[in-house]
Image: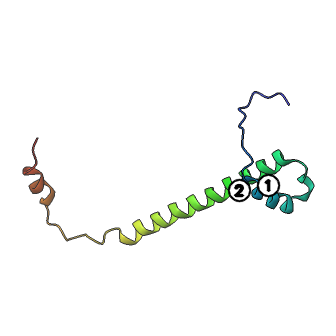
Amino acid sequence: MPTTLRRHAITETPAVAAAIEAAARRWPEDRDRPARLLARLVDVGFHTIEVELDEAALKRQQALEEFAGSFTGVYWPGYLEEIREGWPE
């Protein structure tokens, strides 16, 4: 089918074949359409990764909020300026 979109070639390695087989069990209506099965696998993989990335970002944010301010009062006023005095320019 003509398209202006980029196309990608993929070799049916044993892992890819196994993925297509699993996808055919999941979406039997597309059993005879391996390209469609691969597109569905990409879509599911994309959404899975997005969820994982969102969860990781949420955990980082929660960790930052948990520790925010925990070192308040450890360093005296002017500490940073004193340290910087010894730095080369």
Locate the N terminus by quadrant.
Answer: top right
Q: Which quadrant of the figure has residue 41?
A: bottom right
Q: Looking at the image, which residue is at 75% across and 27% down?
A: 4
Along the line of sight, the residue nearer the viewer: 49 or 55: 49
- Residue 82, horizontal then vertical, whole percent: 9, 56
Q: Looking at the image, which residue is at 90% across and 58% down?
A: 28
Q: Earlier in the sequence, mark 1 or mark 2?
A: 2
Along the line of sight, the residue nearer the viewer: 85 or 23: 23
- Residue 15, horizontal then vertical, whole percent: 71, 56
Left or right relative to 21: residue 73: left
Residue furthest to the left = 86
**On the image, numbered disc 1 is attached to which residue?**
20
**On the image, numbered disc 2 is attached to which residue?**
15
Q: Looking at the image, which residue is at 79% across and 29% down?
A: 3
Residue furthest to the front = 14
Left or right relative to 88: residue 42: right
Along the line of sight, the residue nearer the viewer: 59 or 30: 30
